[in-house]
Amino acid sequence: MRIERNINDSFFNSVYKEVWRKLIPDGLSAAETDFIEAVANLQTNDRVLDTMCGYGRHTLDLARRGYQVTAVDNLPEYISEISEAAAAEKLPIETVCSSLQHLQLLHAYDAIVCMGNSFAFFNEREALSILKNFTDHLKEGGVLIINTWMLAEIAIKFFREKDWFYVADYKYLVENQYLFHPARIESQHTIIRQDGAIESIKGVDYIFTVDELGAMLASTGFTLAAIYSTPRQRAFRFGDSRAYIVATRNATKKEVKS
């Protein structure tokens, strides 16, 4: 089957790969790693798949805590950075430079994570294919964690057609369109450097309701276990600004060898 290019594949090829680091609040990555550990009930040497891992803010912390981590991202610069850090610290990290749509996995994992709103990059057809791949490589009872701020129950409340703000030394303007069929927000991002240089990038975030995402998970072999609004496990409520979705992999007859 031919896999179409995803517009978001090149999003982080821009200056945004540096802006993204500066958007992460101090302490959030450690709190989210605590959350992953707790809800997945990880044990020493368990295997964790960190998809769309970026610069490895969860990957490195998980590996330092004694877990075997496979880090996946489609940006070579991010993967090289993680590989160098893993080598320097002798951490149990396997790196894979691949999009999720083309991802080929060799192991069975105890937990799979997709953080930082990355799952919203995919439409329903793409998302279902990715979830099926996760099912095939997650151990029975294993946990899938998806962090997003593009659930409909979030996006409807917080949608703005235009917004601008500062991120460290960058001035950031974003213009959004909320579109239907499929439900999505198409965005034009304009980032202005301190020296006046301007970079413009486009992105798309696909939007699913909690019910729609639950149905997608169920159809690919998962049970939606819980949705939280913070890494401290506060239950998600309508209008919260973030969601941490936790699903468990159902039992099947066929298991992948670890």
Image (cartoon, rainbow, N blue to C red):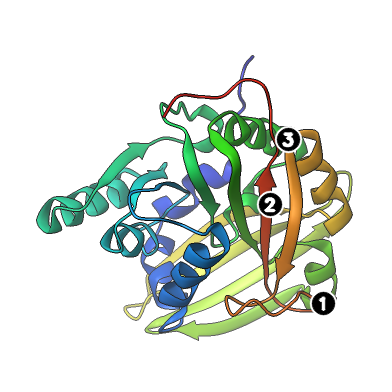
Are the residues at dot 1 and dot 2 in contact (C-beta closer than 8 Å)? no
129 relative to 179 in the view: left or right: left
Picture coordinates of residue 250, whole percent (x, y)? 70, 38
Residue denoted by label 3: 221
Residue at 55% of width from left, 53% of height from top? 114
The amino acid type found where label 2 is placed reads: Ala
Q: Is residue 243 left or right of residue 20?
A: right
* Distance (Cα) linking label 3 and label 1: 25 Å
Q: Position of residue 53 (x, y in %)?
A: 43, 53
Earlier along the polypeptide chain: callout 3 or callout 1?
A: 3
| Residue nearer the viewer, 27 or 73 | 27
Density class for disc 2 (Cα within 10 Å; few <14, some 14-19, many ≥20) is: many
* Label 3 element class: loop
Q: Which image quarter: residue 209?
A: bottom right
Q: Position of residue 14 (x, y in %)?
A: 41, 56
Tell me the CA gap for discs 2 and 3: 10 Å
The residue beneath circle 1 is 237
Tell me the distance, in whole angstroms, between the alpha carbons under discs 1 and 2.
Answer: 17 Å
As drawn, 62 above or below 233: above
Q: Which residue is mark 2?
A: 247
Q: Is the residue 64 above or below the residue 76 in the image?
A: below
- Local SS, label 2: strand
Residue 224 location (% of width, % of height): 76, 52
